[in-house]
Image (cartoon, grey):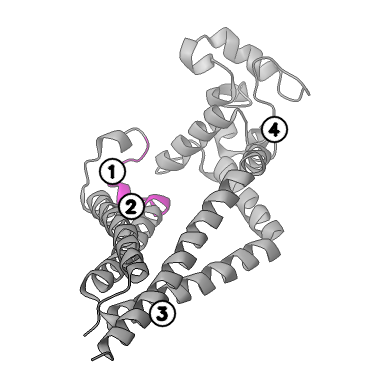
């Protein structure tokens, strides 16, 4: 029986290495996801999420997404790696089917995101506005409050559409004599210094177009600006990922053909 050609051996090696990396990455993601799901005492989350982190819907959704993606990448890497190593045509066939389904799903998702881009943006804005008006500093909403504060500090923004959003909020109604119009996380450096005079000065500048201490831009627009500024990176990452999948699909097809020819050669 004739052996594999030099080109087929090279493809087999590349296929093995590429999918071995997928297998390791998938296993790591799966392990981390399971750890986050079962461990109730996660030190770095103590300040962000009260009680059991998995009780928070956003956190639990993120964890289960990591587990699902990790399991999928692990399975894909296993099929590709073992299929190439053992010259198993059935495994490579399953690999081709899964990658093809994923590619179609990715194309559909991209098309849907383009078509419903404005709806997604509106939904994001409504969700953030709901957090500011109804959830900020409310009982049992510690994770939502911490997430909003973190966003305002990092993105240098305040409120959903504008700082004035807080004056329509449940938080505003419980502030002392309603003297504060925005939380401290909307003010530059105030949380670090703890200076109440600076905090008062910051609140005095609510409604002005420019300020040296108040973050006077809404967080929705800041997030959109950040996405626009980093769109090239996002596109490059997505294209690279899709490119790797297409290469893997081509390699799997070529290898399967070589293995089938080898099995039929006496």
Taking the spot 27% from the left edge, 89% from the top edge, the residue there is 265
Q: Where is residue 251 in the image (x, y as percent from the top left)?
A: 41, 70
- Find the distance from the CA under tag 3 to the CA under tag 1: 42 Å
User: Can residue 56 be found in the magenta stretch?
Assistant: yes
Give the residue at mark 4: 164
Q: Please say if 261 is above or below 120.
A: below
Label of residue 55 in the image: 2
Q: Nearer the viewer, residue 50 or 219?
A: 219
In the rendered structure, which segment of residues is drawn in magenta?
48-59
Label 1 sits on a secondary structure element that is loop
Of the numbered discs 4 and 2, the one sitting upstream in the chain is: 2
- Find the distance from the CA under tag 2 to the CA under tag 3: 36 Å
Can you say which quadrant of the picture contains the C terminus?
bottom left
Q: Nearer the viewer, residue 119 or 105?
A: 105
Q: In screen coordinates, is 25 left or right of 143?
A: left
Taking the spot 54% from the left edge, 55% from the top edge, the residue there is 238
| Numbered circles on residues, count | 4
Q: Do the residues labelled 1 and 2 touch (CB within 8 Å)?
A: yes
């Amino acid at each position: 029986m004739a052996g594999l050609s030099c080109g087929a051996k090279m493809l087999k090696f590349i296929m093995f290495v590429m999918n071995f990396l997928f297998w390791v990455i998938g296993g790591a993601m799966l392990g981390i996801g399971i750890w986050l799901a079962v461990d109730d005492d996660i030190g770095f989350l103590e300040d962000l999420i009260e009680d059991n982190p998995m009780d928070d819907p956003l956190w639990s959704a993120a964890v289960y997404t990591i587990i699902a993606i990790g399991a999928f990448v692990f399975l894909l890497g296993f099929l590709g790696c073992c299929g190439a190593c053992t010259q198993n045509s059935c495994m490579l066939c399953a690999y081709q089917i899964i990658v093809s389904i994923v590619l179609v799903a990715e194309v559909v998702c991209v098309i849907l995101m383009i078509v419903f881009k404005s709806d997604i943006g509106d939904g994001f804005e409504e969700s953030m506005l709901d957090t500011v008006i109804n959830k900020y500093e409310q009982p049992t909403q510690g994770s939502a409050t911490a997430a909003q504060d973190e966003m305002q500090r990092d993105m240098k923004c305040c409120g959903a559409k504008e700082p004035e959003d807080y004056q329509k909020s449940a938080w505003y109604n419980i502030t002392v004599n309603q003297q504060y119009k925005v939380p401290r996380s909307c003010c530059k450096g105030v949380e670090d210094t703890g200076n109440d005079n600076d905090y008062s000065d910051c609140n005095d500048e609510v409604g002005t177009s420019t300020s040296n201490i108040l973050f006077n831009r809404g967080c929705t627009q800041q997030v959109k600006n950040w996405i626009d500024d980093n769109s090239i990176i996002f596109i490059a990452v997505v294209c690279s990922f899709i490119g790797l999948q297409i290469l893997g699909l081509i390699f799997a097809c070529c290898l399967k053909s070589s293995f089938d020819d080898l099995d039929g050669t006496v």
